[in-house]
Image (cartoon, rainbow, N blue to C red):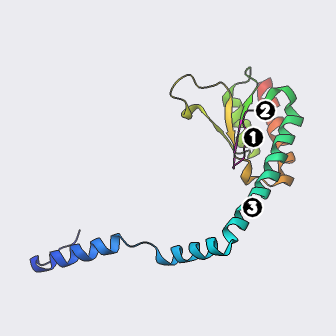
Amino acid sequence: MLVLPEDLIALFRSSKYLSDRQFPTLEHYVLTELIESGKLEQHRRNLWKVFRKRRQAMIFELKSALIDDVEFLSPGASMHAIVRFNPNWLSEKIMHAAAEASLPLASTDCYYSENAVLNEFMIHFASVPPESAKPMVGRFLASLRRSQTN
């Protein structure tokens, strides 16, 4: 809230209108330079290669460890993939095991208006370096096995 003399209200409204409508000039300038120089496209390609390696490592490790108890539904071309686990497992135990292993897993339940798919999750592989996938999946599997016996 701002308290002003009556004769300055119009001036401050105009000033606020102009300042609120300004675009971040420096950021636009830098983005323009990146686009025109081709560096943005180069950066995008480099990230795609990094994410592809991370996706492949995560899929390989989960499929190797869980074989028929895991199914990948999407190729996961961006930063995550959709995965379904054994329908006989409890999703709470899957989430608990993922949390213990620091496996970036999120349920897809909230994306369904009704009839969510059992044990379907989004795995955010982009945050997991390839060399971390195997130990992470190993911890996940160990925790999952412990919880399934309880």
Helix, strand or loop under label 1: loop
Which badge, 2 or 1, is on the more N-terminal residue? 1
Residue at x-position 73% and y-position 47%: 102
Q: Position of residue 81 (x, y in %)?
A: 71, 41
| Residue 136 seen in the current view | no
Q: Where does label 3 land, which residue?
A: 45
Crowd band around label 3 with a 10 angstrom C-alpha radius: few (<14), some (14–19), many (20+) = few
Q: How many marks?
A: 3
Q: Which residues are magenta?
A: 73-82
Q: Residue furthest top?
A: 88
Q: Residue furthest right?
A: 64
Residue at x-position 81% and y-position 44%: 58
Decide whether residue 77 is among the magenta residues.
yes
Compared to residue 120, the image places residue 132 above or below, namely: below
| Residue 120 seen in the current view | yes
Which badge, 3 or 1, is on the more N-terminal residue? 3
Q: Position of residue 39 (x, y in %)?
A: 69, 71
Cα gap from disc 2 to disc 1, whole angstroms: 24 Å
Crowd band around label 2 with a 10 angstrom C-alpha radius: few (<14), some (14–19), many (20+) = many
Q: Nearer the viewer, mark 2 or mark 1?
A: 1
Compared to residue 113, the image places residue 37 above or below, namely: below
In the picture, the disc for residue 75 is 1
Q: Residue furthest front?
A: 36
Image check: 9 left or right of 69? Answer: left
Decide whether residue 10 is among the magenta residues.
no
Cα gap from disc 3 to disc 2, whole angstroms: 36 Å
Indicate the amino acid at tag 3: Arg
